[in-house]
Image (tube, grey):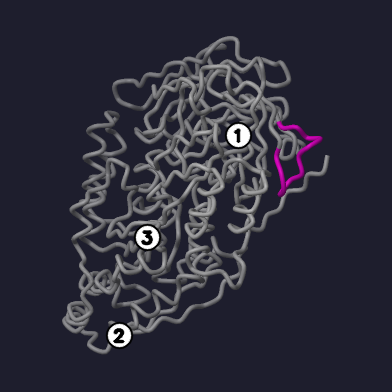
């Protein structure tokens, strides 16, 4: 077995065009696809088939407390079971937890765990294993830890019952339990160093360590004793890490893979080669975060007129057509266009208007504009000229300060930069809200607050009815757009290519990557 984990993120080739970089960014930033919690194929037509998939991101570890989301999820979600599952529309269904219920005050969540489940080692997957995993994730720094911030304790009163007690209601917790924070690790081994490379799994596949080469290819063999085996029609899954879009297209043509994402410029050629193309309009977004909303470091940003002027500086539609070649969508808002928080009316809030933007800057006391320094990150470099020119046209001079790839996270979170450009994968409405609008959110670097927003955040946390919570998230979205907390510019789309006999089931509604999003063409499929 040759496995060694790499901690660096793939870098686009220096000569790449912005479009090629956009595809790579979108795929690294997000797991673009939807998933289906019921069988993708219920016939035997896929019993001996292999799904050969290419991704751009290398898993950093298989330690349940260190899992990162993105295309890496294709690998670890196949190895680990999750308490809940999402369908193609992002709606929740039973997973390892066959049922759940909240107390009236929303501060106690009780999960009933399926009986008879087993780890790949043969040991039982039970309430004790769930408690041990949640405790480890809750107490260990990592991407998933913040999602369990409201948890005060986890109890396992019997082998099939888990009780999660919360400090305060957290309506986003259920969705979190369908992603990395909801995986189930083996209590005996998950803290061992060996788990990072060779985990004992609870999911539908085991990692074939003899055929796996970390950073290159991951071979997964389906378990015959998995409780939800019928949801996984592929006996073998081979996941290749290919960081260059052109190389990904060549791998499809050569038959090394039968599914993968491609650059829009390759669509015609790949389609002619016999592949089916499925276009997902939005998988990631490019956002200029106007973080210093009180003007503590950059006084102009404390003025709403300045922030609105920045929003008016971009010809969003032209950028999508010329830079992304139409593979994307112009936007004035943050949230996934397939989600409940999205409001099409908000996209009319800031029409492209250079003269109007200059007028607002003058009214705010900056007739000659001002200067700002922003971090130049590995995934923003290709887009920086666009933002430099647009801001320069209204009098804002931008200086880009190079930041090493390994320091990107700390540079943005340090508070050094009053505004910064990011390209982020789309997440759920609760996830985007937590990251950008919560006072402790990762993207709310200056911990901005507002009485109206604070009230809305409290309402969203306590509302367990999805239909009602969608309305609250739309209000949060409206608040963010009207107060110009950031400048969304465009969504990046993705094109999936699948060989005859394989179908891609996602449309962008759900944002977690899973093998369940691939089905066998011509077989019975259901969406429940």
Q: Quadrant of residue 326?
A: bottom left
Label 2 crowd bin: few (<14), some (14–19), many (20+), radius 10 Å: many
Q: Residue at x 41, y 81 (%)?
A: 398
**Residue 478: percent from the left, percent from the top?**
21, 53
Instruction: Say which residue label 2 marks.
Output: 395
- Viewed as shown, does residue 60 lie left or right of 513? right
Q: Nearer the viewer, residue 264 or 275?
A: 275
- Viewed as shown, does residue 332 lie left or right of 201? left
**Residue 187: percent from the left, percent from the top?**
67, 25
Describe the element under mark 1 as helix, strand or loop.
helix
Q: Main secondary structure of the magenta part?
A: loop
Q: Is residue 350 magenta?
A: no
Instruction: Say which residue label 3 marks.
Output: 326
Q: Residue at x 26, y 63 (%)?
A: 484
- Residue 320's place in the image compared with 104, above or below, is below
- Residue 116's place in the image compared with 461, above or below, is above
Q: Residue at x 36, y 42 (%)?
A: 430
Nearer mark to the viewer, of 3 and 1: 3
Q: Looking at the image, is mark 3 or mark 1 earlier in the sequence?
A: 1
Structural distance between the alpha carbons of marks 3 and 1: 44 Å
Nearer mark to the viewer, of 2 and 3: 3
**Residue 15: percent from the left, percent from the top?**
59, 73
- Viewed as shown, does residue 292 lie left or right of 136? left
Q: Quadrant of the C terminus?
A: top left
Q: Nearer the viewer, residue 314 or 82?
A: 314
Instruction: Say which residue label 1 marks.
Output: 136
Q: Which mark is residue 174?
A: none
Q: Which residues are magenta?
A: 207-218
Structural distance between the alpha carbons of marks 2 and 1: 50 Å
């Amino acid at each position: 077995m040759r496995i060694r984990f790499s901690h660096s993120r793939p870098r686009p080739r220096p000569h790449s065009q912005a479009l090629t970089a956009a595809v790579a960014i979108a795929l690294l930033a997000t797991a673009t696809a939807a998933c289906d919690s019921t069988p993708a194929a219920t016939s035997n037509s896929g019993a001996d088939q292999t799904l050969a998939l290419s991704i751009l991101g290398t898993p950093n570890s298989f330690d349940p407390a260190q899992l990162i989301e993105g295309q890496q999820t294709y690998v670890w979600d196949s190895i680990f079971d999750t308490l809940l599952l999402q369908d193609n529309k992002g709606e929740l269904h039973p997973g390892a937890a066959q049922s759940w219920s909240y107390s009236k005050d929303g501060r106690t969540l009780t999960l009933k765990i399926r009986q008879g489940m087993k780890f790949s080692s043969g040991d039982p997957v039970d309430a004790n294993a769930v408690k041990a995993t949640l405790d480890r994730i809750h107490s260990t720094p990592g991407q998933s830890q913040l999602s369990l911030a409201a948890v005060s304790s986890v109890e396992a009163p019997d082998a099939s019952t888990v009780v999660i007690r919360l400090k305060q209601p957290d309506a986003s917790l259920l969705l979190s339990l369908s992603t990395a924070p909801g995986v189930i690790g083996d209590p005996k081994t998950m803290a061992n160093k060996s788990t990072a490379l060779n985990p004992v799994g609870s999911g539908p596949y085991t990692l074939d360590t003899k055929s796996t080469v970390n950073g290159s290819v991951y071979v997964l063999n389906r378990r015959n004793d998995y409780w939800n085996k019928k949801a996984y029609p592929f006996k073998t899954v081979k996941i290749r890490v290919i960081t260059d879009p052109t190389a990904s297209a060549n791998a499809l043509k050569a038959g090394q893979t039968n599914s993968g994402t491609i650059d829009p410029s390759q669509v015609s050629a790949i389609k002619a080669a016999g592949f089916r193309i499925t276009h997902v309009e939005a998988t990631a977004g490019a956002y200029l975060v106007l973080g210093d909303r009180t003007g503590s470091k950059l006084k102009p940003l404390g003025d709403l007129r300045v922030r609105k002027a920045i929003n008016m500086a971009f010809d969003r539609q032209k950028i999508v057509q010329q830079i992304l070649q139409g593979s994307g969508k112009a936007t004035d808002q943050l949230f996934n266009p397939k989600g409940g928080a999205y409001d099409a009316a908000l996209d009319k809030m800031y029409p492209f208007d250079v003269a109007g933007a200059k007028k607002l800057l003058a009214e705010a006391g900056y007739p000659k504009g001002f200067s700002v320094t922003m971090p130049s990150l590995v995934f923003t470099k290709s887009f920086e000229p666009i933002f430099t020119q647009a801001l320069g046209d209204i009098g804002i001079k931008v200086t880009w300060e190079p930041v090493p790839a390994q320091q990107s996270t700390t540079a943005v979170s340090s508070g050094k930069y009053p505004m910064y450009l990011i390209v982020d994968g789309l997440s759920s409405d609760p996830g985007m809200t937590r990251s950008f609008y919560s006072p402790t959110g990762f993207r709310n670097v200056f911990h901005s607050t507002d009485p109206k927003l604070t009230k809305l955040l409290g309402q969203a946390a306590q509302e367990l009815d999805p239909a009602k919570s969608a309305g609250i998230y739309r209000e949060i979205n409206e608040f963010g757009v009207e107060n110009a907390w950031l400048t969304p510019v465009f969504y990046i789309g993705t094109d999936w290519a699948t060989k005859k006999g394989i179908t891609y089931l996602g449309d962008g509604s759900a944002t977690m990557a899973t093998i369940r999003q691939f089905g066998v063409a011509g077989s019975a499929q259901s969406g429940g």
